[in-house]
């Protein structure tokens, strides 16, 4: 007879019972978690109403994917260019000026991202009492940017990448800021701050939110946290909304408004990075401490000056079909900059770059030339008017995602390889100071029996890429690659393919590492395809 239950296997019954109960508990806890998620969204919506923050819930859907993945914004119906999708009163933005800690922050002389971080910490410390509690409860405690990783994680995940040193410097500099500016406020400030909310760790957490979510509002408010506007995710070069803090009398009648916005945004970038130094591209990360507010958030948040200049507007700049996510752009950034500031990367980011430090060029040159020789050639390069990019006192050259080296590096290598007679001739004919009009024509003098078109760097490149220089580029790529350790790129690619995106630190640092190593591979291909000799560095007698 078959027994109704397999009582002969009591252990098995027990096992099934435990598993059944566990499943119910697990399902319940998942439901509870997501219920809590939508609760936080409901609370936020109520808060927006209380602040007269206008948006249409029949046009846009706010989707809560949980603490890890956060919120995203979807279009419920087709959205067309020019549609205003939100109107945000400036008073609803959390800034130094609007915070209850304004007096303390201003009296302590704190401004910029440091002051705004203190405002965020203060409002968080007020809990339900804060005017922004309905907004703050929606935000993660911190953004998962490398700044808030432990030092061990920074070493483990970022070794060799463009971010390794920068993040370590960030952490040290920001700790100094905290000690110098915030610790005294806890000790003897006017507001009896609770140390539990104002420690170094809380400061780093607030700073991660400020860097990843703040926007420039206007001259009076400066940068601030802009509720609702900060819910849009980023997509490089494919944004749907614009957001600008520039007030124009009537945006619809201002034909130049787009141009002006773009110019302002570019200026924002210039202020905060090294782009103005040379022809450096935009993918390079800079220490957060130096960048102040890297997020120029290019969404169109225009001051509405028709009747109420106290509000900001978000406008659709590229149509969105119903059901699709509505994206913003945080700017044109490589993965190092994206990971640094926002804690994520994009798989095929064309703004990716790798840097070759001038020191690496020096190290390579010492295998062929004396240090005196290198310094003399470097000095000629500078006298002609060239320099690399500079960040935190480090001079470097960028290699773009397709492996193309920065023009200034090619010139430096060209000068290093100039035959002595040409070098001496050049050195003596050049004025000792003052600018040189046509440096390329001077440089390529020895090659100019026939006319060489030098109107653009592109034209000149063909003449600069000698076999020696191509060999040097390959050697430099090899030296830069050594910083990633001894495992081959294929190992990194394999581990990335098996890594879950939910493991954010590992996943995004792996994307960064693989992309950088592929750029170095592209640099080798770039050099090999232009050289006529078998590659593997230039073998020369030491001069
Ligand atoms: C201004 S918030 C955007 C809204 C955010 N998703 C939320 O939950 O509120 C910026 C953060 O969103 C996330 N994010 C934005 N765009 C992303 C993307 N393309 N891929 C992955 N994460 C993204 C990152 O964590 C980033 O620091």
Image: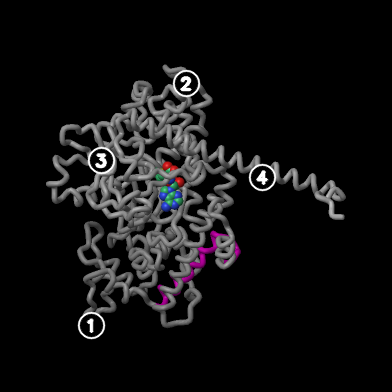
From the viewer's side, name the closer residue of 323 and 246.
Answer: 323
The residue that mark 3 highlights is 313
Image coordinates of residue 244 in percent, x first then y, are: 26, 43
Which quadrant of the figure contains the C terminus?
bottom left
The residue that mark 4 highlights is 23
**Secondary structure category for the residue under label 1:** loop
Dividing the picture into quadrants, the one containing residue 308 is top left
Q: CA distance from mark 4 to mark 3?
A: 47 Å
Image coordinates of residue 34 in percent, x first then y, are: 52, 40
**Whether residue 108 can be seen here:** no
Marks 4, 3: nearer the viewer:
4
Q: Residues within 10 Å of mark 4 (few under 14, many from 20)?
A: few
Labelled disc at residue 4: none
Labelled disc at residue 193: 2
Q: Residues within 10 Å of mark 1 (few under 14, many from 20)?
A: few
Pointer 1 or 4: first along the chain? 4
Pointer 4 or 3: first along the chain? 4
Give the residues drawn in magenta, as a range.
Answer: 467-488
Residue at the spot 36% in from the left edge and 56% down from the top edge: 236
Marks 3, 1: nearer the viewer:
3
Dividing the picture into quadrants, the one containing residue 466 is bottom left
Q: Residues within 10 Å of mark 3 (few under 14, many from 20)?
A: many
Q: In the picture provided, is 267 more to the left or to the right than 14?
A: left
**Secondary structure category for the residue under label 4:** helix
Q: CA distance from mark 3 to mark 1?
A: 59 Å
**Secondary structure category for the residue under label 2:** loop
Labelled disc at residue 450: 1
Image coordinates of residue 35 in percent, x first then y, are: 52, 38
């Amino acid at each position: 007879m078959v027994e109704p239950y397999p009582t002969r296997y009591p252990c098995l019954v027990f096992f099934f019972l435990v598993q059944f109960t566990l499943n119910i508990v697990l399902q319940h806890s998942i439901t509870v978690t997501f219920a809590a998620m939508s609760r936080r969204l409901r609370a936020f919506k109520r808060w927006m109403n209380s602040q007269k923050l206008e948006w249409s819930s029949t046009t846009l859907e706010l989707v809560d994917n949980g603490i890890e993945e956060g919120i995203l914004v979807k279009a419920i119906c087709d959205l067309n260019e020019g549609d205003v999708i939100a109107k945000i009163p400036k008073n609803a933005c959390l800034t130094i000026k609007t915070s209850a800690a304004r007096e303390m922050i201003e009296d302590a002389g704190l401004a910029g991202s440091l002051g705004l971080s203190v405002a965020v910490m203060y409002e968080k410390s007020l809990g339900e009492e804060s005017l922004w509690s309905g907004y703050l409860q929606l935000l993660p405690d911190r953004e998962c940017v490398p700044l808030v990783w432990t030092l061990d994680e920074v070493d483990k995940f970022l070794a060799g990448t463009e971010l390794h040193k920068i993040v370590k410097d960030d952490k040290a500099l920001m700790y100094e800021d905290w000690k110098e500016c915030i610790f005294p406020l806890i000790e003897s400030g006017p507001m009896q701050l609770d140390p539990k909310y104002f420690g170094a760790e809380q400061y780093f957490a607030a700073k991660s939110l400020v860097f990843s979510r703040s926007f420039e509002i206007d001259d009076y408010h400066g940068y601030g946290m802009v509720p609702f506007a900060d819910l849009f995710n980023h997509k490089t070069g494919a944004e749907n909304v614009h957001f600008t803090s520039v007030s124009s009398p009537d945006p619809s009648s201002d034909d130049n408004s787009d141009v002006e916005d773009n110019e302002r945004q570019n200026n924002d970038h210039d202020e905060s990075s090294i782009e103005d130094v040379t022809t450096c591209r935009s993918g390079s990360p800079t220490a957060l401490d130096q960048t102040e507010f890297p997020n120029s958030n290019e969404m169109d948040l225009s001051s509405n000056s028709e009747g109420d200049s106290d509000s900001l507007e978000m406008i659709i700049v590229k149509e969105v079909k119903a059901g699709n996510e509505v994206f913003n752009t945080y700017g044109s950034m490589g993965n190092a900059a994206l990971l640094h500031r926002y804690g994520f990367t994009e798989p095929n980011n064309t703004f990716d770059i790798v840097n070759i430090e001038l020191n690496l060029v020096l190290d390579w040159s010492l295998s062929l030339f004396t240090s005196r020789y290198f310094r003399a050639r470097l000095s000629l390069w500078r006298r002609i008017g060239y320099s690399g990019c500079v960040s935190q006192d480090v001079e470097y050259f960028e290699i773009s995602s397709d492996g193309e080296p920065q023009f200034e590096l090619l010139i430096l290598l060209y000068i290093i390889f100039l035959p002595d007679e040409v070098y001496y001739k050049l050195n003596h004919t050049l004025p000792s100071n003052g600018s040189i009009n046509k440096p390329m024509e001077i440089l390529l003098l020895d090659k100019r029996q026939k006319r060489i078109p030098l109107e653009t760097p592109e034209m000149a490149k063909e003449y600069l890429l000698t076999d020696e220089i191509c060999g040097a580029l390959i050697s430099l790529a090899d030296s830069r690659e050594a910083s990633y350790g001894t495992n081959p790129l294929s190992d990194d690619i394999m581990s990335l393919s098996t890594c879950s995106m939910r493991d954010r630190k590992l996943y995004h640092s792996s994307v960064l590492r693989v992309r950088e190593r592929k750029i170095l591979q592209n640099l080798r291909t770039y050099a090999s395809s232009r050289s006529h000799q078998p590659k593997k560095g230039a073998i020369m007698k030491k001069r």
